[in-house]
Amino acid sequence: MIGDRSGFLVIDDTALPKKGQHSVGVASQYASSLGKTSNCQSLVSTTLASREVPVMVGLRLFLPETWTEDAERMTRARVPKDRQVALTKPEIAIEEIDRVVASGVRFGCVLADAGYGSSGPFREALSKRGLLWAVGISRRQNVYPPDVALILPVTKSGKRRQYHIPDCAPVSAAVMLEGETWQKITWRRGTKGRLTCRFAARRVRVADGHKHRMLDNRMQCMPGDEVWLVGERRSTGEQKYYVSNLPIDTPLKKLAATIKARWVCEQAHQQLKEELGLDHFEGRSWIGLHRHALMTMIAYAFLQSRRLKAAGRKKKNRRAAAATQHAGHQASHTRPLRATSASAMPSL
């Protein structure tokens, strides 16, 4: 329906609030959808989106350490043997991306918030797979300028250093963009008007490479690959930061539109819960929860197909009405008739 090279694969997580302690994976944990720490189940979600139309293609339960360290508890909740391992959410996300890619789904860029984007191994895994990505990071994430050089420092005394170090110290993402020009960018029109924020971007190298001990005995991460660092200043005063491996000639407006495309997954999560009852499951087992999630995903995909078909009919009807109106307008103006041969006339 929507898979194409201009589409996005959005990685996020959604929480299912719970009261008790027996539902599989339930624990006191931070829920981004709730904005606080709560007793809940947390599902890593994978959403395919194109032209602002989302379709959920993956929902997989995250198991906290309180579960993975308790084999009896996992057995009681019927967690499969191959899932009884401790995995972080970024690690689960990479497994889900591999599954989606293997199934033949088409997309152009992977999007994720800072909960995933702040993980260096997550970004590295995406790059190794040849994928484009745009992900959130912490404002405190250290970065280097793109022209940082590695030097072999000369010590006045002691053993000669065997490793190269950067010729400048890293600074936080927020500090790196302070002196940049912030532009007002409109990336699309919403139901309440144009969506606009101020953005700034520059090329950097993220400080998430291997660690070296410096002369002052502190540990410092080496610079990684060159990427885009993008800052966003909202009208509320809130500031967000992102990194992306999109090409070096990508304009700022496209960077902003790509980053903001991630929010379509919030719409999918809301509709799955409010319209299809994703958060209404009352069972306790791993199998039961994932079967319930799968049924809501199938129903959601079916509803999206109906919506797209209905939208296509409306668009076709509008084109037909416009053509009829144009023909009537043309007929109201007298024009000299041109002779047409019978063979050139289309047959009915």
Image (cartoon, rainbow, N blue to C red):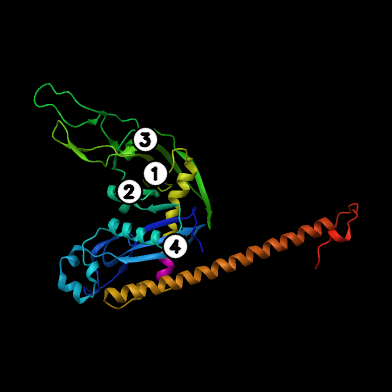
Q: Are marks 2 and 3 in contact (CB under 8 Å)?
A: no
N-term mark: 1 or 4? 1
Label 2: element kind: helix
Q: Residue 72 at x, y = what percent?
A: 15, 73
Q: Residue furthest front?
A: 343
Q: How far apart in space, not on screen, are marks 2 and 3 (Cα)?
A: 24 Å
Label 1: element kind: loop
Instruction: Determine crowd level at label 4: few under 14, some 14-19, many 20+ residues with C-alpha closer than 10 A.
Output: few
Relative to 134, is 106 above or below?
A: below
Q: Are marks 4 and 3 in contact (CB under 8 Å)?
A: no
Mark 1: amino acid: Asn
| Front: mark 4 or 2 | 2
The residue segment tinted magenta is 269-273
N-term mark: 2 or 1? 2
The residue beneath circle 1 is: 245
The residue beneath circle 3 is: 178
| Front: mark 1 or 3 | 1
Q: How far apart in space, not on screen, are marks 2 and 1 (Cα)?
A: 9 Å
Residue 272 shown in magenta: yes
| Front: mark 1 or 4 | 1
The residue beneath circle 4 is: 267
Q: Residue furthest top?
A: 156
Q: Residue 267 at x, y = what percent?
A: 44, 62
Q: Are marks 2 and 1 in contact (CB under 8 Å)?
A: yes
Mark 2: amino acid: Arg
The quadrant holding residue 64 is: bottom left
Name the residue: 44% across, 38% down.
248
| Front: mark 4 or 3 | 4
Instruction: Determine crowd level at label 1: few under 14, some 14-19, many 20+ residues with C-alpha closer than 10 A.
Output: many
Q: How far apart in space, not on screen, are marks 1 and 4 (Cα)?
A: 26 Å
Q: Residue 82 at x, y = what percent?
A: 24, 67
Mark 4: amino acid: Gln
